Image (cartoon, grey):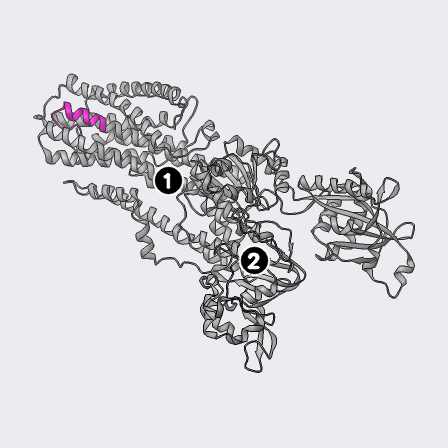
Amino acid sequence: MRFLLRRLSKWPGGQKVEPENRQNVNRTTHANWWHMPLAKDSTSPSILRAFASIPPDSALGYMQSCRQGLSQAEADARLKIAGPNVLSSKNPPPWWKLLLLILPNPFTILLVFLAIISVATPQPDWKTFVILMVMILISSAVRFWQEYRSSIAVIKLQSSVSADTKVRRQCPTSGKFLDGTQTSESTIHVKDIVPGDIVIIRPGLTVPADCLILEASSLYISQSTLTGENEPLRKTPNLQPAKFEKEDPRFFELENVAFMGTSVISGSGLGLVLRTGDDSFIATIMKQLNKKRPVNSFQRGIRNVTYMLIGFMLTMVPIVLGISGKTTGNWGNAALFSLSVAVGLVPEMLPAIVNTNLAKGAFSLSKKKTIVKRLDSIQNLGGMSILCSDKTGTLTKDEITLSDYLDCSGVRNRGVFQLAFINAKCQEIQGTSIDSAIINFQSREPMQIPPYEAVSEIAFTFERRRSSCIIRGPTKKLKLVCKGAYEEVLALCTSVRDGAKTLSLCAEWHKKLAAQAERLSSDGFRVILVATREVKDSEMGNEDFIEDDLESSLTLEGFLTFLDPPKEDAAASIQRLQRLGVDVRILTGDNMPIALRLCQLLNLVSYVSEGDAQAITGPELARLEGTDQFHDVIRTCKVFAKLSPAQKGQVILSLKANGDCVGMLGDGINDCVALRFADVGISVDSGAGVAKDCADVILTEKGLNIIVDAVTMGRVTYGNTIKYIKMVASSNFGNVFSILIASAWLPFEPMTSLQLLIQNLLYDISQIAIPWDRMDEEYLQEPKKWDAIDLLRFIIVLGPTSSTIDVLTFCLGWFYYNIRTADDPEAVKLFRTHWFLQGLLTQTIIVHLLRTAKIPIIQSRAARAMVASTTIIMAVGFVLPYIPLFQAALRFVNPAATFVGFLAAELLLYCLEVQLVKVIYKRIFKTWL
């Protein structure tokens, strides 16, 4: 809130006003009630750290509040200044404005220009015009819908805050501001909460604002929505060290601050509201989502290709116009002919081919339980070179699993597990995830459990951090079995079990146990202790018996280690991704040891230790921000731990800036920024609603193997798209190159503008089956991305190969058929008919050579749909000059009988030529498609 940073200079003397002195303050100054000189800047982390470092009473003074709460009048006054406690979002622009924003993209403008040209000739081609306009409408409609839906993500974030909460309100009895009042608890809507309110914190509450903890009783809050860590944090009123440095973003660890949107697991407390609405920390995520989505790899690639094609067209058209006009002397016809060349140069079916490719890919992925929200994300999956993944719930099962059971010397001991199982079984009704993990382990790996009778149990609480049970074993003696957190249980122990001996818990044992616990924790395990003691019947029968008193003088039996294990298919799927050239990185809010342990289990790296060059924490990364090392470190690191949501987004943007196509796999609110910034955001169906809205692809099953299938499908989609662009662009350039030669050589136009348009249309129709074509297996092994330079090189090298056959046809017409003048209209028609047939058939049949880097038919065969479409178009094109209706409309004549033999020879020669050029091209440039 803007007013939160205003100095208190307008107050008398500019001094802080303590609660007991505030009744004399004029209410007209309420806009200036807060002053925090310790805050380095106006950001939420800085302000919250500052409040966390001062006593609660001082914080109340700065906020001009007290533990009894605000009066209703005061709250109403503050509400007018602060505004509602809601996360504001930008409403989607009106549909007409959004449409105007998406229409002016380069390829749409180019298609509109070509559509106008197609009907600007004396013989307008309305079919081409209609096709182009339909393509424009389809592509614009798809983009319109995608842009409109993207705005929903911001609105959904508001659902993370509950509707109602309880606050303390003063009931004035004397008319004074703070004196002579009574306090009551009022239930209000969260939007009415204001800075300075005293919030009642209770189990099940979603914290309605950023609050300073004033009082706490066994208060545990889950911050998983912000950090991704499932373990609840204990919140207390204890002061926290004042750390204001930018490189210390660990404000999530502040014990005395509760963040808006987090969940209260247990306990109770009082919270002083510090930041509401758009000034809360969670609003910083909102602000990132409000930003325009960055251009992704596909959009950047198609834009560059479009600009290249436009530049190519603008270069070639004036050349054709000049040569044709000077040769024929008819500048009007030359202008129309050059415009037809412009149409012929551009792959006007590109939107149709691209959209069909994407739609087919989305349909195929839907069968594999993958929902594609943004169609262009399919091609980004194919181009993905780096996959960043959150840890919890995506790579791991998001459930605690028992890993090992060890005695005090670190040796596996069945007795330790038996005791732990008995304890867990006694707690089964109200047990924790630890109890469930132990019971599930017994179900998977059954172990003989000694007979016992449950007598009593002491339930687990977050305050005690342990649970106990009292049982009667085969000897009929009572025994207490306790298990819980390391510090809490060890503090109750006076002895240790060493084999069959019971030894005193001396300093040496303390040191030995601490070393074992440290080693296990550094390996990413959660450590639980198991301890016991004999209980006398007289202790149970004592009327002054207190169960907690029995948890003393315990004998430590051993350790239990737990882990959130990786999913069964995670390691294999990651290996498959790596074989496909996709580098996997871990981005998590968890601690480094846990992240490193996961990496070792998944074989992401052979060995990584904390402080290794391949691993870095959020605070360490923050210290590098703004330096030359920042991007270098991100480029080389495999493991990023203790990252804030904003830092996850920074990592994504840095990797993208390096030229990589980056994917992000995440399912929490803390992943939203990264999901939005990535070239392709991937979430799961069980993820947070806002995360799914930010994602481009949603997995309906939590199997990483689905991502591998999606990557492969993306590469097939990309391959078929670039296949079309390269083939049609190189073919069109070959035609234009041939036209340049003909314009400089022949005294007549080698083909009419209408014939050229029909030839291009037939060729484009033959390519409609490309989305159903196959891609060579070798092609799918590496990430693919759009490269305008590679496309230009392909066009320049492959285009002229068709011109050699065109020139051969020109020579046949000039020398063999003696067509050398424009004075004989029928001879000119024959020349044009021959070149129409040769041009259409060669550029159609050559698709089978260009579609693969291998030898066609022998090593790689096209899909049946592709074979059928090219065969049909070649047949239609061949018979077209023989049909009287089309012969008259297109000014054809029957081809010379001898030309059919020449045509067959030309087709064979052309195939051999292209195959030879392909071999040389691959050898020089190490690539093909």
Question: Where does the image place residue 704, in percent across and percent down from the top left?
Answer: 56, 40
Q: Secondary structure at mark 2?
A: loop
Residue 188 appears in the picture as rendered: yes
Q: Is residue 523 left or right of residue 761?
A: right
Region rendered in magenta: 736-751
Instruction: Find out whether residue 768 is within the magenta segment.
Output: no
The amino acid at mark 2 is Phe
Q: Position of residue 691 (x, y in %)?
A: 51, 51
Q: Which residue is mark 2?
A: 259
- 778 horizontally vs 125: left or right: right
> Do residues under tags 1 and 2 come within 8 Å of each other at their CB atoms?
no
Q: Is residue 582 left or right of residue 754?
A: right
State whether residue 698 appears in this view.
no
Q: CA distance from mark 1 to mark 2?
A: 38 Å
The image quadrant that residue 269 belongs to is bottom right
Quadrant of the rendered structure where residue 325 is?
Answer: top left
Crowding near the residue tagged with mark 2, few <14, some 14–19, many ≥20 C-alpha atoms within 10 Å: many
* Residue under the image location 61 percent in, 70 percent down: 67
Camera-side residue: 514 or 675? 514
Between residues 109 and 328, which one lies in front from this camera angle?
109
State the residue at coordinates (64%, 38%). Answer: 597
Q: Is residue 604 above or below residue 147?
A: above
Q: Nearer the viewer, mark 1 or mark 2?
A: 2
Is 768 located above or below residue 72 in the figure? above
Majority secondary structure of magenta residues: helix
Q: Which residue is mark 1?
A: 300
Q: Residue furthest top?
A: 815
